[in-house]
Amino acid sequence: MAQEKREIVIPSQLLGDIKNKKAGRGTFVENGKIYAEVLGILNKNSDYINVTPLKGRYDPIEKDFVIGIVEEAMSSSWLVDINAAYPALLHVNEVPWDVDFGETERYLNYGDSIMAKVLQVDQEKKLQITLKDRNLYKIKGGQIIDVEPSKVPRIIGKKGSMISLLKKYTKCRIFVGQNGRIWVDGDDEGVKKVIETIKMIEDEALSFGLTNKIEELLKKDAKDVH
Amino acid sequence: MNAEVKLFENGKRLDGRKPDELRKIKIEAGVLHRAEGSCYLEWGSNKVIAAVYGPREAVPRHTQNPLRAIVNARYNMAAFSVDDRKRPGPDRRSREISKVISEALEGVILVEKFPRASIDVNIEVLDAEAGTRCAGLTAAAVALADAGIPMKDIPVACAAGKIENQVVLDLGKEEDNYGAADLPVAISPRTGDILLLQMDGHLTLEEFDKALDLAIKGCHVVSDLQKKAILQKYQSVSEGK
């Protein structure tokens, strides 16, 4: 890919004509013209004109893996903050434990963190999440860091290249939620390294060839340690 | 009213501006880190800060709309923003301004994308010198874009008015106090739709048309500054250190 700069667009910016391209995410059409609707990065590579938002809330999509923080325990369900515009509902039927009515607080309580999967998003944007999937559980220990949800794909990298790099060099356990929350657990040194690196990825998410740059950096530091 | 006040001298205004000249405007996006989007704006001696929170679930629940988001703008003047101390808290004037700004913003935000949610916009006037509702709305628009809220356009506001039988752009403090009319206008600069239009004082039909045209022209100038401010913040991010 050429080393050209990624173009930043602002809402209402004219991006093209509906005759030549299709309007993709982050755009709207008026009188046959395509405009940007959010502040983001322009992507014109395919048939579609897409704008990847730079900021904003997490827009939940079904089957996404997210990290949630319990806001409220009700008698047969929990309300979980998943960094979306709305709290998500976690019903007792969607957890791996056998919870009696009114006993929800014994399993998950206010402030607990969970790894979860988005089960359902309806037209009213009512959200349901589930814990019934592989490796989903209540988080014990470790740290959660917040990043912009739009930068999550960069942190994961192409086919997970970036995240496996991080895991390889820091020997930490990492779980990246699509909602911009990242859980890290490992020895202090490693966790510190991961947090630093993720901050760097976030800051430079717009540059090209970032994976190689990060790898070099991690390699260098790894040598220093050993 | 003090008839002694001369608002015009040799075709120049009190502060040396031409009739169709704006005051100095400075816009900075993303100044607060706890808010999702924010903006600091200086317009002449007006100093305004705007912060955006949400979209988040609207509370109390009965205010929710199952089809769209509600926009809650809150315009507030600091006690120290005017010559005499302003009694803190919402009064009739600031409630009205909050309402008209909310409605103007609703016209451009894609509210259908966030059913049941509310988008909260806090506009704090730190220093006032006529035209704070325009300054507030302009700042709120930048803060909304900074918060990544989907919008059809970045709204912008500017006022025109009449002093000593002449239609002028962007009234200053004395001009507002002793002038004949004030006409704040907010538009959607891409389409030219009018989002807010208020008038204080008297204008003839011809004067009104002239003032409206002048205000809209002013809006487009401010709009460019807004866009520059947003791009400036994010361009520096994209270039990396």
Image (cartoon, coloured by chain):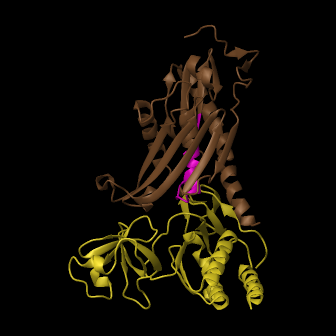
Chain colours: A yellow, B brown
**Residue B195 at x, y percent in the picture:** 50, 41
Q: Is residue A45 magenta?
A: no
Count up the numbered dots. 0
Figure quadrant of the C terminus of chain B: bottom right
Asked if residue A224 is positioned above or below residue A78 in the image, the reply reads: below
Of A97 and A128, the residue lying toward us: A97
Q: Is residue B147 magenta?
A: yes
Asked if residue A36 is positioned above or below residue B220 in the image, the reply reads: below
Q: Is residue B206 visible?
A: no
Q: Is residue B73 visible?
A: yes
**Residue A131 at x, y percent in the picture:** 37, 84
Q: Residue furthest left?
A: A101
Figure quadrant of the N terminus of chain B: top right
Asked if residue A92 is positioned above or below residue B26 in the image, the reply reads: below
Of B240 and B204, the residue lying toward us: B240
Q: Quadrant for residue B96, please give it.
A: top left
Residue depicted at x 69% and y 24%? B19
**Residue B185 at x, y percent in the picture:** 55, 35
Q: Residue A52 vs residue B63: left or right?
A: right
- Please give the range of residues in magenta: B139-158
Q: Quadrant for residue A13, please give it.
A: bottom right
Q: Residue B8 vs residue B119: left or right?
A: right
Of A176 and A111, the residue lying toward us: A111
**Residue B32 at x, y percent in the picture:** 59, 53
Residue depicted at x 74% and y 80%? A209
